[in-house]
Amino acid sequence: MRLRAIALALRGDGLVDSEFSAAGVKPIIAGMGRLRIKKKEAVIPFRETLAYRMMLLAGSVVVFLIALYIMVGALQANITVSFISSGVVAAAAAFAVFYNLDHLRDARIPKQTMNRMKRR
């Protein structure tokens, strides 16, 4: 009888509490009833998430600041090759900052995170 009750529970047939108790199967928490299996949320590729886009933006800002620091140091030391090369890197990093800011709008946010943000 006990195996039959467990098999019916696994198969999804509706068992009433009396059938559980007749079979000798006791629920862990009596008031909970049957647990439902939640549907899993669609998995978003990491490269499309907001976190990835923010990491790219932060990396671009860091490269821009370092290139700017080296450029100022090269200007003070009067090293033209270093000044020009760090200026080119700073210009590319500035372009990357604005590029990443533009693509930040296209980032996908998981539905659960959106619901959490709406509650606050």
Image: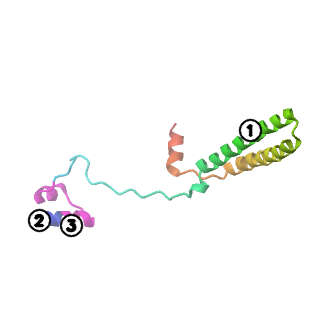
Question: Disc 3 and disc 1: Cα gap in Å?
Answer: 64 Å
Q: Quadrant of residue 46?
A: bottom right
As drawn, the label of residue 65 is 1
Q: Which quadrant would the N terminus be assigned to in this image?
A: bottom left
Q: Residues within 10 Å of mark 2 (few under 14, many from 20)?
A: few
Amino acid type, residue under disc 1 in the picture: Leu
Residue occupying the point 30% across, 54% down = 35
Extent of the magenta region: 6-25
Tell me the element at label 3.
helix
Amino acid type, residue under disc 2 in the picture: Met
Q: Residues within 10 Å of mark 1 (few under 14, many from 20)?
A: some
* Relative depth, front residue between 34 and 60: 60
Residue occupying the point 79% across, 47% down = 89
In the rendered view, tell whether residue 69 sits above or below residue 98.
above
Q: Which residue is mark 3?
A: 7
In percent of width and height, residue 62 lies at 69, 41
Asked whether the viewer can see residue 113, the reply is yes
Reading the chain from its start, which is encountered first: label 2 or label 1? 2
In percent of width and height, residue 32 lies at 26, 48
Question: Disc 2 and disc 3: Cα gap in Å?
Answer: 10 Å
Q: Residues within 10 Å of mark 3 (few under 14, many from 20)?
A: few
Assess whether residue 14 is covered by the magenta stretch. Answer: yes
Verify CB contact (< 8 Å) between mark 3 and mark 1: no
Residue occupying the point 81% across, 34% down = 73
In percent of width and height, residue 111 lies at 52, 51
Residue occupying the point 78% across, 45% down = 94
* Relative depth, front residue between 102 and 2: 102
Verify CB contact (< 8 Å) between mark 2 and mark 3: no
Amino acid type, residue under disc 3 in the picture: Ala
Q: Which residue is mark 2?
A: 1
In percent of width and height, residue 18 lies at 14, 56
* Relative depth, front residue between 43 and 9: 43
